[in-house]
Amino acid sequence: MKFKLQTLFVVAAAMSAMVACSKDDDNNNDNMPPDNNPPKATINITNNAQLGQVITDSLGNTLYFYSMDSKPDTSYCSGGCLAVWPAFYSANLTLGDSRLHADDFGTITRADGAKQTTYKGWPLYYYASDAAAGDVKGEAFNNVWFVAKPDYSVMLVNKQLVGNDGVEYNSAYTPGKAITQFLTDDYGRTLYAFSPDKFKKNTYTDSLFTKNPTWPIYEVSAVNSVPSILAKTDFDTVHVFSHVQLAYKGWPLYFFGPDAMTRGNTKGVSVPKPGVWPIVNLASAVAPQP
C-alpha cells in the first residue's frame, strides 16, 4: 500500500511539473516578438521602367492578359499554348498593394479541369521566356499578349463580331467569319464609336442623358495606361455636359446597353444597321473635324 501511495505521489508531481511548463511556454509565446518575415503576398504591383505598374506574383514574376480570352470565365490558351504561357493560380490569394482590390479577383475552372486566377475577368498567365523577376518579354507578343496592369483605361479583345441580329460580321461590317481586334474597357467590355460624331464632339448624348441606357458613355476621370501597341497620345477626354467621356482618335467612346456590360458582347455593331456604331481599333480613321 505504501508503494502505491509513493507511486501516485510521483505521478502527480510529474503532472504538476508538465502543467507548469505548459503555462510557462504559453506565457513565453505571448511575449515573443512578431514574425519579422511574414509570408509574401501572392499578388503585388511592381513598377517597371518601361511599362509602369505591372501585376506580379510573390516573387516579382510578371503576369499577363491574353486578348483572345473574350468570353466570361473562359481561357482560350490550351495545349502547346500553355507550355509557353503557363496559367497562374493561387488557392489562398493575398494582396500586397492597396491599389489591388479583392473583388477584382476570381477563379475559373479551365476546360482541362485545372484552376486559374483571374483579374477583372482576365485569366492570368506567366510567359515562359521571362527568365527573371521583372522581365516583361511577353508584352505585345503577336499583338495579343499584354502585361497585366491595375490601371488600364482600355484593353484589347480579339474575337468574331456578332451583331444584335445574330449575324457574324467581319471588320468591314459585312457578313462573314473573321477575328477582329477592338478596344474594350479594362474588364473586356466592348467600346463603340457613333459614326455621326465629330472630332472630340459627342453629337448623340442629350443634356438629360435620356439615351444613356441604350448607349452609355464611357466615363473616365483621366487617361491612364493603354496596351503598348496603342499610342496613348491617341486618347483624350471629352466633356459631355457634366460628365467626362473617353475618346480615341477623336471618337467619343460608348458602351451598348443590350451588351449587358458583359465581356466580349458586340451586339451594337448591327444597330440600327452595320457601320452606324462601329468598334474602334488601330485601323480606325481619325474622327472628322466639326
Image (cartoon, grey):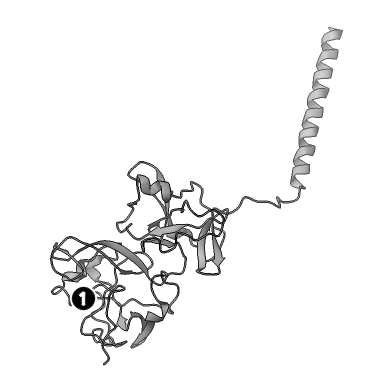
Vertical placement of residue 91 versus 119, above or below: above
From the viewer's side, name the closer residue of 49 and 268.
Answer: 49
Q: Horizontally, is 33 left or right of 132 in the view? A: right
Picture quarter with the C terminus? bottom left
Picture quarter with the N terminus? top right
- Callout 1 crowding tier (Cα within 10 Å): few <14, some 14–19, many ≥20: many
Badge 1 is on which residue? 277
Vertical placement of residue 187 versus 273, above or below: above
**Among the 4 quarters of the image, the one containing residue 257:** bottom left
Q: Residue furthest bottom?
A: 290
Vertical placement of residue 167 versus 280, above or below: above
**Among the 4 quarters of the image, the one containing residue 198:** bottom left
In the rendered image, residue 149, in percent from the top left (x then y), is placed at: 46, 65
User: Which residue sits at x=40%, y=59%?
Assistant: 65
In the rendered image, residue 238, in percent from the top left (x then y), is placed at: 35, 85
In the rendered image, residue 148, in percent from the top left (x then y), is placed at: 45, 62
From the viewer's side, name the closer residue of 199 and 30.
Answer: 199
Q: Horizontally, is 84 left or right of 43 in the view? A: left
From the viewer's side, name the closer residue of 240 and 175.
Answer: 175
* Element assignment for label 1: loop
Vertical placement of residue 227 versus 94, above or below: below
User: Which residue sits at x=23%, y=80%?
Assistant: 194
Q: Horizontally, is 33 left or right of 189 in the view? A: right
Q: Amino acid at mark 1?
A: Trp
User: Which residue sits at x=56%, y=67%?
Assistant: 47
Say if residue 138 shows up in the picture: yes
Say if residue 109 shows up in the picture: no
In the rendered image, residue 272, in percent from the top left (x then y), is placed at: 14, 74
